[in-house]
Structure formats: C-alpha cells, structure tokens
Image (spheres, helix red, strand yellow):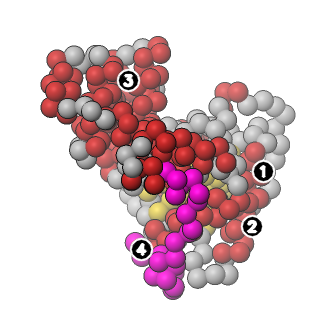
Amino acid sequence: MSRNPFGELPKNLAQAVDLSSLGKPPMPLPEIGIEITQANLVSEILPASNAQVVIALCWSPRSAQSRDILNILSDFHNADSVGPNPWVLATVNVDSEAAVAQALQVQSVPIAIAIIQEQIVPLFESVPPRDQVRLVIDKVIALAAERGIGSTADAGEAAEVEAPMEPEEIEALEALENSDLAKAIEAYKRWLLRTPGNPMAELGLAQVELMQRVEGQIPSEVLTLAAAQPLEIKVQLMAADLEIIQGNYESAFNRVVSLVKALSGDEKKVARDHLLGLFKLVDPTDPQLIKARQALASALF
C-alpha cells in the first residue's frame, strides 16, 4: 500500500477519560494482542484488515480501566480464535505511540475501534458490560462477513440471528408508533443508564432527539434563513439537522464545520458537540463522514 493512511483515519473519538486528566503512577498492561506502532500500522495492520477484522484497544498506562477492558477483549478473542470467524486483537499505547494516537485523534481512553478493509469504525468507550462487548463484536464480525472479510462459514446463518430486543427498546419503539417522541427519548436514556455505552441505545437516542429537534420545522424556510444568517448558531444547527434528515450529509457536515471554524468559546464547543452528535447518525464507514471527521480535526487543531 503506497498511500499514507493517516490522513484517512477518523478523528475526534468520543470522550471516556480525558487524557489531560489522567494521573500517575503508570501501570503496565499485559502483553496481549499485537501492539500497533507507527512502523507496523501501514505495513502490517491495515493490510491485515483486508482479510480479518482488527479490533484495537487504544489505552494509556495511566488509565486503570484499560486493563479491565483488555481482559474482556482477550477472553473473547481466545474463544473466537477457534471459531469460524477469528479476528485480530491489537493495542495502541497512546503515550508511547504519539503519532498513531494523533492520527486517530484519540482524546480519551480506553476506546475500542475496529479496522475493516483499512477503514476505522469506533466501537465503544470506557468499560461496557461483558454482554454488550460480546454483542458489539458479533455485529462487527457479521458486518465484515457481508463484505467478504474473515471466514464466511456460517456467516449467512449468523447474520440472520438477531439479538432479543431489550425492554427499553421495545418501549421506545412502541412510543414512536404512537408519535410520543418524549417517551421514546426517556426509554432510550434509561437503556443507556442500565448499559452505558450501548451502541444501539446511543443510535436510537440520537435518532429520536433529531426527530424532536426538527419537529414542526419547515425546511425551505430554515434553509433560507440560514443562508441569510451564516453565523447564527441556532439557525445553522437546525439547518444541519434538516439536511441530515434529507440525507444531504455533506452539506450538513460542511455547515457545522464552518461554524466551528468561525466561532469561539462556548459557542464553538456547542457547534463541535452538535456535529459529533450528527456523526452518530451516519454509517461510520461513509466516505462523507470520514472526510468530515478530518475537516473537524483541522478546524479544532
């Protein structure tokens, strides 16, 4: 692979433990998995992701949670290594591998990511419950199998097996059938309180909160007003919401990135956080999202 992949990797992963707040003394992490370095990322890790899913834990020796989540990942990796869909377990020490950490724009640890066909997919942060980690890994393996990555033995059958719905998820969907957005939001929030970091709950909450924000808005009027008031943050964020609803991701992302560049202080943070929320609504492998993450990183740094 001749191109430099660093410019193509997603930026600004969500926060779990702010790196600037981590204290000492450092603790060593067990030697589990393949250590990703600036030297082997391009020559070994990315090429390997074309044949097998790579799940990498970004960690710091100053983070006590890193050992816990690595042990969970190691247990599942050992179990899956003898199964039909093995995957590669890797680690990134964000302290010793500053270049890799900067390329990934890691702002918090621990964070787990998947690498599939040289594309980065954020998975979860902090230390979710074991069953949620298992669920996320299974979904990633199924997604990769659909793309021909990893062993496809029994992949079709595995993809057809759906995890049972959670009670809060059922409640949220019933609320949506009744057009009760507030009740659906409350259900998703309770789901997240019970299982912090659950990706399905986070996605559902983000979707319904978007629906609530745009309820009653007339797109043509909002977009016309946004064109006349390029620095009015409330108008611009509403316009971006509507563009996401319409599937115009590139315009929505560019709109908010421009705000981040132009604003400062609290307003800049509001625009950034809103954009990170919009990112959750789009397929992590979508080229427009990857491009927007790069643009946001440039705007911030």
Q: Earlier in the sequence, mark 4 or mark 3?
A: 4
Residue at 84%, 34% in the rendered image? 25
Crowdedness of circle 2 by 10 Å Cα count: few (<14), some, many (20+)? Answer: few
Q: Are the residues tagged 1 and 2 within 8 Å (C-beta)?
A: no
Task: Determine the secondary structure under disc 3.
Answer: helix
The residue to which callout 1 is attached is 67
- The amino acid sitting under disc 2 is Asp
Residue at the image position 40 percent from the left and 61 percent from the top: 1
* Residue depth check, mark 1 versus mark 4: number of the one nearer the observer: 4
Q: What label does residue 260 carry, if any?
A: 3
At a point 25% along the width and 31% down the height, the residue shown is: 217
Where is residue 21? Give x, y as percent.
Answer: 70, 27
**CA distance for labels 1 and 3:** 35 Å
Report, in whole angstroms, how far the alpha carbon at label 4 lies from the one at label 3: 37 Å
Sequence-wise, the earlier of marks 2 and 3 is 2
Judge left or right: residue 295 versus residue 12. left
Q: Position of residue 284 (x, y in %)?
A: 42, 52
Disc 1 or 4, which lies upstream in sequence?
A: 1
Residue range highlighted in magenta: 147-172
Q: Quadrant of residue 242?
A: top left
Whole-Å distance between the Cαs marked 2 and 3?
Answer: 41 Å
Question: For mark 1, does the 10 Å Cα neighbourhood hold few (<14), some (14 to 19), or many (20 or more) residues?
Answer: some
Q: Which of the two labelled residues, at mark 1 and mark 2, occupies the earlier sequence position?
A: 1
Q: Earlier in the sequence, mark 1 or mark 3?
A: 1
Left or right of 49 on screen, residue 124: right
> Where is mark 4, residue-wise?
146
- Going by the numbered disc 1, the residue's amino acid type is Arg
Query: Tag 3: residue type?
Result: Val
Magenta highlight on residue 18: no
Residue 194 in the image: above or below residue 272: below
Question: What is the number of the mark on residue 75?
Answer: 2
